[in-house]
Amino acid sequence: NDLSHYFDCNPVKIMDYHNHLTTLTGRGLLKKTMSGNRVKSVANDQFTLVDEISKAIIKNLPCPEIKPKIYKDIVEILERIYALGNERDEGTITTQDLFDEVNFILDTHTHFPFVQKIKQMEAENADKWLFLYLCWKTIIGKERSDLHVAINGLFDIAAIKVYYAQSFMTGNNKLVNEGWVEIEEASFFDDTEIKLSEKGTELLLAENIKLYTHKSKKKNILAPEKIKSKTLFYNQEVVAQMGMLEKSLTDKHLKHLQKRLTGKAMPGGITVLLYGAPGTGKTESVYQIAKRTGRDVMRVDISNSKSMWFGESEKIIKRIFTDYHSFIKQCKRCPILLLNEADAIISKRKDSSSSNVAQTENAIQNIILEELENFQGILFATTNLLHNFDKAFERRFLFKVELPKPEPAIRAAIWQSKLEVVSRAECETLAERFDFSGGQIENIVRKCNISEVINGNWPPLAQIMEFCSEELFSKDTGSSIGFTKAKPQPRHILS
């Protein structure tokens, strides 16, 4: 517009030179910006001389050779492409400008294997930019991105934005179909998340890029050095089972075992079910094995994985296994996936016609069964309710270990290990008198420590027995722990 006014000619005459201006921009002699009007129009394009050319004109010097900027590594390239996306979102460049600049950067950096792989995708411009956007997000530690946020500023026309988003939701997008990204749908479009798949992440890892999704930042990851050593007491049968299990998880045996199993077309994963009454040490057993074998634990409480939104629970369960397989690649040793209190997902399946809840629970179980069928890794599941165990899971667990309530001799050993100031005879008395699990015994020991802090001395045996009595629910009176049943009081009506 400015040029047509300056030369006092029809704007169409100036538009004939638009391709030349674009060529000069590509050679780095001009800078192209966008006016405040976000509507794509050639008439709104604005061009400015780059600083080097302006200085040469002012100093009456020959036109300098403008070389394209060469980035030293993939991280710099991805950072620049992400910055271009911000410029597009702010309206300083057009969508086509964004795509042209991205393609120019890739064309001038084909010496990087990463760039070669991107070009081999033969993806559309929007898909290419979105994949690179997700790469940068992954590098800075954000594994998942909102699809809505990622493409919100990419297109001016709302309909195009919706159609592009729908290509992901309907599975028609090339990035999804070819396994470069994963889509995690939600109940609403704004909540839909997208992330690099393992295939996509491998492109970054191949460039020796350190990803900031370190295990220590995950709240549900327990490192072996953070686990305190504890002595656990089992009967002879359980000692033999747990001993064999622990030996199979040592570095010396696990790799050899997995190689042999996979060589015979059998699953190479180690899947373990620990079952028994509450407080018998199921979860602690997993922790102690992890500590002695030097393995991280990814703990998942299944009760927290149930979503109030119909259809969300299945996606959460799938994400558990996806996250675990990604976590394996970050660890020197194969970590342990712990499904704690897994009663909800390995219980007997229900009639799916009875309710939507039954359909959801059955769908979750089918996902678990499918994942366990060819599981590669180490999985422990704990449950208190074996009587409600679905038979379909029986063959999916390689080890099935029952941790029963301890016998009197074992209970006495537990008392002795925790009450060092109490005599062996008194520990045997407590073991005979109270049929406690290890967890219940630990509760009593905690009360003893509280009593010593408050009173200044260790409680006598009579006081310890009183603590034991308070630990039990009374079947006769129905009173709660530590409380007496109150007499019914008359009701008062306030006017």
Image: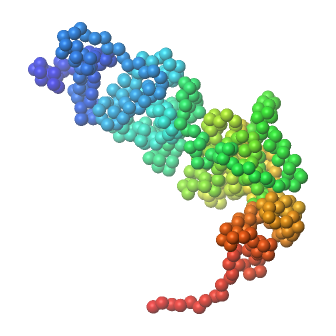
* Quadrant of the image occupied by residue 96: top left
Residue 225 in the figure: left or right of residue 36: right
177 shown above or below 318: above
Residue 346 appears in the picture as rendered:
no
53 shown above or below 307: above
Residue 316 in the figure: left or right of residue 45: right
Where residue 361 appears, as percent x and y from the top left, is 65, 54
Q: Residue at x 61, y 53 (%)?
A: 305
| Observer-nearest of 373 and 56 | 56
Residue 470 appears in the picture as rendered:
yes
Q: Residue at x 80, y 39 (%)?
A: 248
Image quarter where the C terminus lies is: bottom left
Residue furthest left as drawn: 8
Where residue 322 appears, as percent x and y from the top left, is 61, 40
* Quadrant of the image occupied by residue 293: top right
Q: Residue at x 65, y 60 (%)?
A: 354
Q: Residue at x 72, y 49 (%)?
A: 287
67 shown above or below 338: above
477 shown above or below 425: below
